[in-house]
Amino acid sequence: MKIILQKEIETLGVPGDVVTVADGYARNYLVPRGLAIPASKGAVKHADRLRAGHEQRVAKSRVAAEAIAQRLVAATVRIPAKAGEEGKIFGSVTPERIAQELEKAGFTIDRKRLHLDEPIRSLGAHQVAVHLHPEVTVTVPVEVVPE
């Protein structure tokens, strides 16, 4: 069955895309949830407008993400933590803690956008990847200092 996507679906496409899916998937899941509509001649014209609107929103959000990325590159996040004599901290520095420190510095970034391979467990400088947009990722220096 041919359908037109109304919302972005990771495995299928973006709003305005005309895709072919199984009949049951379209009738039982996509259409009832408002994620897609059946394709018809009039709906295809509507799909073009949807696609254009989606592209504008993506472009605008990318520009905003790039502006934030330029400010983030210049920022250094300092996080005080209790540590032992060997430089190992008690507990760990998590993305939530980093997001709190970024908010104090004037950046509102969701902790889910911060990517750590593993929690930070030692003093010193570390690099944290921040995914601001699917096409914009920036590395923020994080310095863990003793209290």
Image (cartoon, rainbow, N blue to C red):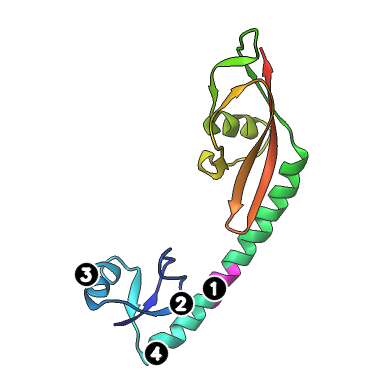
Residue bearing mark 3: 28
Label 2 vs label 4, nearer the camera: 2
Place of residue 5 in the rendered image (x, y in percent of width and height, measured from the top left): 40, 74
Residue type at tag 3: Asn
Element type where label 3 sits in the image: helix
Q: Residues within 10 Å of mark 3 (few under 14, many from 20)?
A: few
Q: Residues within 10 Å of mark 1 (few under 14, many from 20)?
A: some
Nearer-N-terminus badge (4/1): 4
Label 3 vs label 1, nearer the camera: 3
Q: Residues within 10 Å of mark 4 (few under 14, many from 20)?
A: few
Main secondary structure type of the part rendered in magenta: helix
Residue bearing mark 4: 42
Could you tell me which residue is drawn at 27 percent across and 76 percent down?
A: 22
Nearer-N-terminus badge (2/4): 2
Residue type at tag 1: Gly
Element type where label 2 sits in the image: loop
Nearer-N-terminus badge (3/1): 3
* Residue with the most extreme bottom position: 41
**Looking at the rendering, in which quadrant would you find the N terminus?**
bottom left
Label 1 vs label 2, nearer the camera: 2
The answer to whether the residues at label 3 and label 1 have Cβ atoms under 8 Å apart is no
The alpha-carbon separation of the residues under discs 3 and 1 comes to: 27 Å
* Residue with the most extreme top position: 85
* Residue with the most extreme right position: 74
Q: Is 36 inside the magenta-drawn segment? A: no
Q: Which residues are magenta?
A: 52-56
Nearer-N-terminus badge (1/2): 2
Classify 66 as above or below 121: below
Place of residue 56 in the rendered image (x, y in percent of width and height, measured from the top left): 60, 70
